[in-house]
């Protein structure tokens, strides 16, 4: 082998191992697709760009997911599945209702803070009036788990005599999500208007404590 041939081989990219690992290939595609949809929106995202960044092909992406819309739905499902899985891992049953709710609120707060792509994806789906979520029964069933968890916490809190009885689980989920979501979705406009950096560590810690105290105070038995 000549020196030129050796140099040419050294410059060639190594063959991807993903072709023999379909599940890893799908995970990699989903990860890159999440970034692409979060950055460009549904309309602006390009399957060609996703294929280029995953060292795969547009044809392979369509083989695994069926098309752009199906890939977007898979991304949404993965995004929601991550937070629902996080909630399932919380040790809520071993403590009283107040502590269980505290753990869930803090987990929601931390998840949203760490995952701005999730916030952007939800915002994008709202721009489209939730049409993709509406047509996906699996996504709706997936997210029913958080309502069941909150409903269980509320019932325990009422039986313990510490929670009011006129708040339902959807009300509670809305209250928690709205605060945690707003902080990430609106941090740039909020910071520009009021000169407060919501990502600054001191402000972040204060906000994390504040949302827990607000929700627990609101739910306090009358």
Image (cartoon, rainbow, N blue to C red):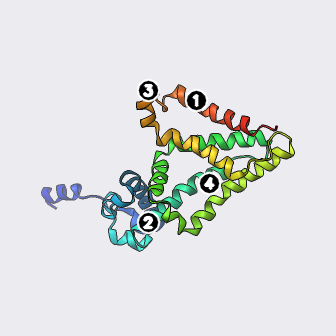
Q: Position of residue 37 (x, y in %)?
A: 40, 56
Pick whichever, 187 or 109, lies toward us.
187
Instruction: Name the mark nearer the viewer: 4 or 3.
Output: 3
Which quadrant would the N terminus be assigned to in this image?
bottom left
Q: Position of residue 216 (x, y in %)?
A: 72, 37
How many other residues sit within 10 Å of disc 1, few (<14), some (14-19) or many (≥20)?
Answer: few
Pick whichever, 169 or 86, lies toward us.
169
Q: Position of residue 115 (x, y in %)?
A: 50, 45
- Secondary structure, mark 3, is loop
Which of the two labelled residues, at mark 4 and mark 3, occupies the earlier sequence position?
4
Q: Residue at x 66, y 54 (%)?
A: 146
Q: Which residue is mark 2?
A: 71
Q: Marks 3/1: CA distance? A: 18 Å
Pick whichever, 57 or 137, lies toward us.
137
- Secondary structure, mark 2, is helix
Instruction: Name the mark nearer the viewer: 4 or 2.
Output: 2
State whether residue 89 appears in this view.
Answer: no
Q: Which residue is mark 4?
A: 85
How many other residues sit within 10 Å of disc 2, few (<14), some (14-19) or many (≥20)?
Answer: many
> Is mark 2 in CB contact (under 8 Å) with mark 3?
no
Residue 205 marker = 1
Q: Marks 1/2: CA distance? A: 36 Å
Left or right: 204 with respect to 222?
left
Q: Marks 2/3: CA distance? A: 39 Å
Q: Which residue is mark 3?
A: 195
Q: Residue at x 21, y 55 (%)?
A: 11
């Amino acid at each position: 082998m000549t020196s030129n041939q050796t140099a040419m081989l050294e410059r060639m990219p190594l063959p991807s191992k993903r072709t023999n690992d379909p599940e890893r290939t799908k995970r990699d595609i989903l990860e890159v697709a999440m970034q692409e949809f979060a950055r460009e929106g549904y309309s602006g995202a390009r399957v060609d760009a996703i294929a280029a960044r995953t060292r795969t092909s547009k044809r392979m992406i369509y083989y695994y997911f069926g098309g752009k819309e199906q890939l977007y739905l898979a991304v949404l499902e993965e995004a929601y599945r991550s937070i629902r899985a996080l909630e399932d891992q919380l040790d809520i049953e071993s403590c009283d209702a107040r502590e269980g709710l505290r753990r869930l609120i803090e987990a929601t707060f931390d998840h949203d803070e760490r995952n701005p792509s999730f916030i952007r994806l939800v915002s994008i789906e709202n721009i489209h009036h939730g049409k993709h979520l509406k047509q996906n029964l699996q996504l709706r069933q997936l997210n029913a788990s958080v309502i069941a968890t909150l409903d269980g916490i509320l019932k325990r809190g009422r039986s313990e005599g510490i929670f009011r009885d006129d708040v339902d689980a959807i009300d509670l989920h809305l209250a928690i999500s709205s605060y945690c979501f707003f902080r990430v979705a609106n941090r740039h406009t909020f910071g520009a208007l009021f000169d407060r950096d919501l990502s600054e560590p001191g402000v972040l810690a204060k906000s994390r404590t504040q949302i827990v105290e607000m929700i627990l105070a609101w739910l306090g038995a009358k």
